Amino acid sequence: MREGRDTVARFRHEGKVVTRTRIPHGRGELEGKLPHFVRQQLHLSEEEFRLVDVCTYWRIDYVRILKEKGLILNA
């Protein structure tokens, strides 16, 4: 994660960046189209994103989702 004008988060799996997103500082709640763009960058459905937002997912859950969507190959 890098912070500056925006917070840039990268999700790495086995050393490879799989997803990344950027969230502007000082905006408080994500409003307007921003949640939609963050959700797309994270490759999550609306329901998955809602569950991430309330902190019910762990890393292992996110890896499983990305594997199901073919973004991470099963070894």
Image: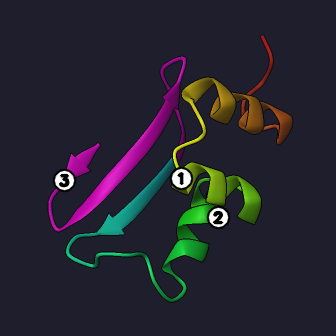
Q: Secondary structure at mark 1?
A: loop
Region in magenta:
1-19
Examine the rendered structure and indicate whether residue 55 appears above or below residue 7: above
Q: Principal SS element in the magenta part? A: strand
Residue 3 included in the magenta stretch of the image = yes
Indicate which label's residue lies in the foreground, 1 or 3: 1
Amino acid type, residue under disc 3 in the picture: Glu
Q: Within the image, what quadrant is residue 68 found in? A: top right
> Which circle's residue, 2 or 1, is located before the other in the chain?
2
Q: Cβ–Cβ below 8 Å for labels 3 and 2?
A: no
Q: Secondary structure at mark 2?
A: helix
Residue that carries the numbered disc 3 in the rendered image: 3
> Which circle's residue, 1 or 3, is located before the other in the chain?
3
> Which circle's residue, 3 or 2, is located before the other in the chain?
3
Residue at 64 percent across and 51 percent down: it is: 51
Residue 27 picture location, percent across and down: 28, 79
Residue that carries the numbered disc 2 in the rendered image: 40
User: Is any atom of residue 45 visible in this view?
Assistant: no
Amino acid type, residue under disc 1 in the picture: Val
Q: CA distance from mark 1 to mark 3?
A: 22 Å
Q: Secondary structure at mark 3?
A: strand
Residue at 49 percent across and 30 percent down: it is: 12
Image quadrant in which the C terminus is located: top right
Amino acid type, residue under disc 2 in the picture: Gln
Residue 6 picture location, percent across and down: 24, 65
Examine the rendered structure and indicate whether residue 1 appears above or below residue 61: below
Examine the rendered structure and indicate whether residue 56 appears above or below residue 67: below
Residue that carries the numbered disc 1 in the rendered image: 54
Q: Residue furthest left?
A: 4
Q: Within the image, what quadrant is residue 8 found in? A: bottom left
Residue 54 picture location, percent across and down: 53, 53
Residue at 64 percent across and 60 percent down: it is: 50
